């Protein structure tokens, strides 16, 4: 759910996000297609207005008869999925009390954490976070637990959020530092972890980066395909978004549809690091960007399916 400039922008975003979900589930080896719904609002609603909107949306999802199952993402959460669940069973990520597996954001953060370690290993020859600096953009559902894991493993964590209160709260909790949201591109760090909005990697922003690795949860990080080539040319390792941020999708599908145990889920989340390692090796072997290597992997899996 997001405020868009025009309905056309919302539609374009929905199509891009849906394509990314298709690639995400293919690369994660889950036996389903991918889809995404966008709710375009003039402002983020609350209270009764919010509830009424999600009930209307639930009726729309129900009308698709299970060919599409919805879940939470930006600006939506467990409580909203519980409202949707009042009208349709085709919803992932309801609260545990309401029969779901909870928010996909924490397992997404676990997957990103594995992805950051695999990326460090590729660039520095060691996945040790001790002494590394990671800049987390977005102190929300994913960024906040990710900051905890990174700090627990010994990293110095920098946090940037358009809501400075959130950035300061998370930074204080993990013993890190808060940054103004408009200074993050120029900040020296080992890893830049975008966990807020998409479109942050463009031909205008990539030249400003002062990191060795970009690895975060945001969907559709590349504003344009050329940004991937520019990252490659600058020697900045980019963890393709739909590979590294699959943890939430893996968790809700695994726990709610495939009947996995928590330990099976842990194994599947750790595999995100392994998939990234393979993607990096392929990109190196062929001299192509990591984004191109991940697209190839997705296409191969889709063809095989
Ligand atoms: P969220 O809404 O809980 O948190 C986003 C945070 O980013 C908020 O604190 C917000 O204030 C901040 N923010 C927004 N614009 C910003 C900007 N320009 N600069 C800095 N901070 C900004 O969202 P989330 O669930 O944590 O998801 C974060 C990203 O990860 C999104 O792109 C989402 O699509 C993607 N993602 C989320 C999941 C999931 O399971 N939640 C799964 C895969 C991908």
Image (cartoon, rainbow, N blue to C red):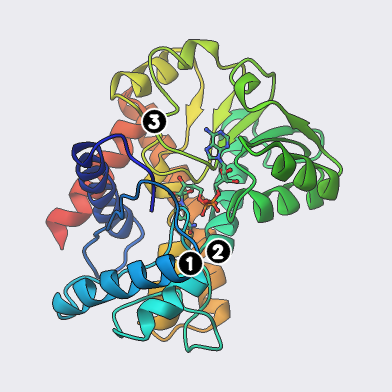
- Is 96 left or right of 33, judged from the image as shown? right
Which numbered marker is on residue 290? none
Whole-percent x, y for residue 200 in the image: 45, 28
Is the C-beta of the residue carrying label 1 under 8 Å from the nearest atom of ligand 1?
no
Is the C-beta of the residue carrying label 2 under 8 Å from the nearest atom of ligand 1?
yes
Q: Which residue is mark 2?
A: 107
User: Are there few (<14), some (14-19), or many (20+) residues within 10 Å of tag 3?
Assistant: few
Which circle's residue, 1 or 2, is located before the other in the chain? 2
Q: Which residue is mark 1?
A: 268
- Name the residue located 72 percent from the left edge and 53 percent from the top edge: 149
Is residue 108 among the parts visible in the rendering?
yes
- Is 40 left or right of 79, judged from the image as shown? left
Q: Which residue is mark 3?
A: 199
CA–CA distance between discs 2 and 3?
A: 23 Å
Asked whether the beta carbons under mark 1 and mark 3 sit within 8 Å of each other, the answer is no
Q: Considering the numbered disc 2 on the image, is that residue within a helix, a strand or a loop? A: helix
User: Are there few (<14), some (14-19), or many (20+) residues within 10 Å of tag 1?
Assistant: many
Against 52, residue 72 (above or below) is above
CA–CA distance between discs 1 and 3?
A: 28 Å
Which circle's residue, 1 or 3, is located before the other in the chain? 3
The quarter of the image holding the C terminus is: bottom left
Against 106, residue 9 (above or below) is above
- Name the residue located 29 percent from the left edge and 54 percent from the top edge: 38
Residue depth check, mark 2 versus mark 3: number of the one nearer the observer: 3
Is residue 211 among the parts visible in the rendering?
no
Whole-percent x, y for residue 118 in the image: 57, 44
- Is 222 left or right of 108, judged from the image as shown? left
- Name the residue located 85 percent from the left edge and 44 percent from the top edge: 172
Q: Quadrant of residue 212?
A: top right
């Amino acid at each position: 759910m997001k405020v868009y400039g025009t309905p056309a922008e919302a539609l374009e975003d929905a199509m891009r996000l849906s394509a990314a979900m298709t690639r995400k589930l293919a690369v994660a080896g889950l036996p389903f297609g991918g889809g995404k719904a966008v709710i375009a609002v003039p402002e983020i609603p609350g209270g009764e207005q919010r509830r009424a909107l999600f009930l209307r949306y639930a009726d729309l999802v129900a009308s698709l008869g299970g060919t599409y199952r919805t879940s939470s993402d930006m600006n939506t959460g467990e409580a909203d999925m519980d409202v949707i669940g009042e009208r349709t069973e085709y919803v992932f990520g309801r609260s545990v009390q309401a029969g779901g597996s909870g928010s996909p954001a924490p397992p997404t953060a676990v997957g990103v954490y594995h992805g950051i370690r695999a990326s460090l290993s590729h660039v520095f020859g060691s996945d040790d976070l001790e002494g590394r600096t990671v800049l987390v953009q977005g102190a929300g559902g994913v960024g906040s637990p990710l900051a905890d894991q990174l700090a627990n493993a010994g990293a110095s964590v920098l946090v940037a959020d358009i809501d400075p209160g959130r950035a300061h709260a998370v930074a204080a909790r993990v013993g890190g530092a808060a940054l103004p949201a408009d200074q993050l591109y120029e900040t020296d760090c080992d890893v830049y972890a975008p966990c807020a909005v998409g479109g942050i990697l463009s031909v205008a922003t990539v030249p400003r980066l002062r990191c060795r690795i970009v690895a975060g949860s945001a969907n559709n990080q590349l504003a344009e395909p050329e940004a991937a080539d520019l990252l490659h040319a600058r020697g900045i390792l980019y963890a393709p978004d739909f590979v590294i941020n699959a943890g939430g999708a893996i968790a809700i599908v695994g726990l709610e549809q495939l009947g996995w145990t928590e330990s099976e889920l842990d194994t599947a989340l750790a595999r995100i690091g392994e998939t990234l390692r393979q993607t990096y090796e392929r990109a190196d072997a062929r001299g192509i960007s990591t984004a191109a290597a991940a697209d190839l992997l997705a296409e191969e899996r889709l063809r095989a399916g």
